Image (cartoon, helix red, strand yellow):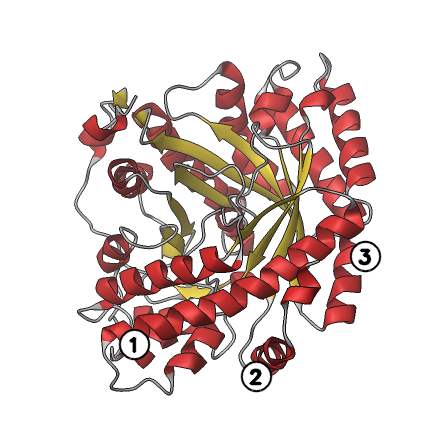
Amino acid sequence: MIQSLITATEVNETNQMIRHENLDVRTITMGISLLDCIRSDMDETCTQVYDKITRTASRLVPVGQEIEKEFGIPIVNKRISVTPAALIGGASAKSPEDFVKLAKALDRAAQATGVNFIGGFSALVPKGATHADEMLMESIPEALAVTERVCSSVNLASTKAGMNMDAVRKMGEIIVRTAERTADRGSIGCAKLVVFCNAPDDNPFMAGAFHGVTEADTIINVGVSGPGVVKTALESAHGVDFGELCEIIKKTAFKITRVGQLVAQEASKRLAVPFGIVDLSLAPTPAVGDSIADIFREMGLEQAGAPGTTAALALLNDQVKKGGVMASSYVGGLSGAFIPVSEDQGMIQAAQCGALTLEKLEAMTCVCSVGLDMIAIPGDTSAATISGIIADEMAIGMVNQKTTAARLIPVIGGKVGDMVEFGGLLGYAPVMPVNGYHCDAFIGRGGRIPAPIHSFKN
């Protein structure tokens, strides 16, 4: 049993990290396959989807609360991910409105089970889109406007398949329409929508979680956090060289991952659901002291975005992974360091003072876990410009054989320097400037950018 592997010293260290350093398990996410819910009629499909989710995940939230109480480990979120909805609705959807029906069924199921988010209103289109994929993408603005807990993602590119520029162009338009449809709420619909390159099948974090078709019927994935723990560990490391700095981060990541492993094993056993992976991403929150940017400052940077930031992030990301893989045999998902602007107090401050720009964030995504995450931009940013930003981010992932993503929020009516509130873990963000030069003709070409030469490995 995993409990026997954890010593009294580790228990004391864990208690310290929880009480004073913002350590938590960010999410227990139950992945559920909905392939057996496909019917030729959308109403029947929705009924099957609702029934399976509520039946399978009925004990997810109570079990999470039991583990929290018994072990004293905060579990911030309990979530569900499902098979990409474009696959589930393809046999019965006749229009985008049918996919909105499916989104509403997912939302009702999320509410009934008590989870805070359900992911998987998704399409996978790196090489081309089916008619169902097209309808799902068209439905996203309305679906995210009329639901509370549904999250959507679209995989636009991969190292093996290349980049679907027709879908990149469409998603720029969809993001604008989603922002407009939820303009009365700070364009919050876009905070629940992310586009990917090389999207992983087992990511427990929102908004990008979906249950891949290669997964078991039901699975438990856990996402841990702990930027505050790493920051505290580095407070006593002023003046040490990079070799020693790396050792400190690696050992700390090991301890953080052990907590996630414990929670994952317990949840798996109590729910009688197979354990999938631990995602050991350092996921910040708007809370003071729980920031990736604060880690940069402890490393010796005046502010996130200063020269050296990309190198610091590369070091952090690598050592987190090295420490984590020693603590669990099943590390997956995204795993590394997240750099969402709105969800990280230090990143917010860096963006406000001008130290952190969109271009610097793009450079940082070459070495981090995800990409341009939770970035508010002016509401009058054109769809083509948004598509151009997405294309740049997809290219980084495609060429470097890694996951990248973009969660951009054009705040309708928002100007550079304005603040927009999203609430909860989504936080708040300053509206950041965007390069004013146009890329309309480039995006308008359409077609597909071929896979890079190093994709041919067979």
**C-alpha gap between disc 2 and disc 3:** 26 Å
The image quadrant where one finds the N terminus is bottom right
Amino acid type assigned to the residue bearing label 2 in the image: His
Out of 227 and 385, give the one closest to the viewer: 227
Percent position (x, y) of residue 127?
A: 36, 21
Residue appearing at x 33%, y 24% in the figure: 161
Amino acid under label 1?
Answer: Glu
Residue 379 position in % (x across, y down): 38, 51
Residue labelled with disc 3: 62
Tell me whether circle 2 and circle 3 mark residues in contact (CB < 8 Å).
no
Residue annotated with mark 1: 244
Write down the residue under mark 2: 20
Circle 2 packing at 10 Å, graded few (<14), some (14-19), many (20+), is: few
State which tag comes first along the sequence, 1 or 2.
Answer: 2
Element type where label 3 sits in the image = helix
379 and 169: which one is in front? Answer: 169
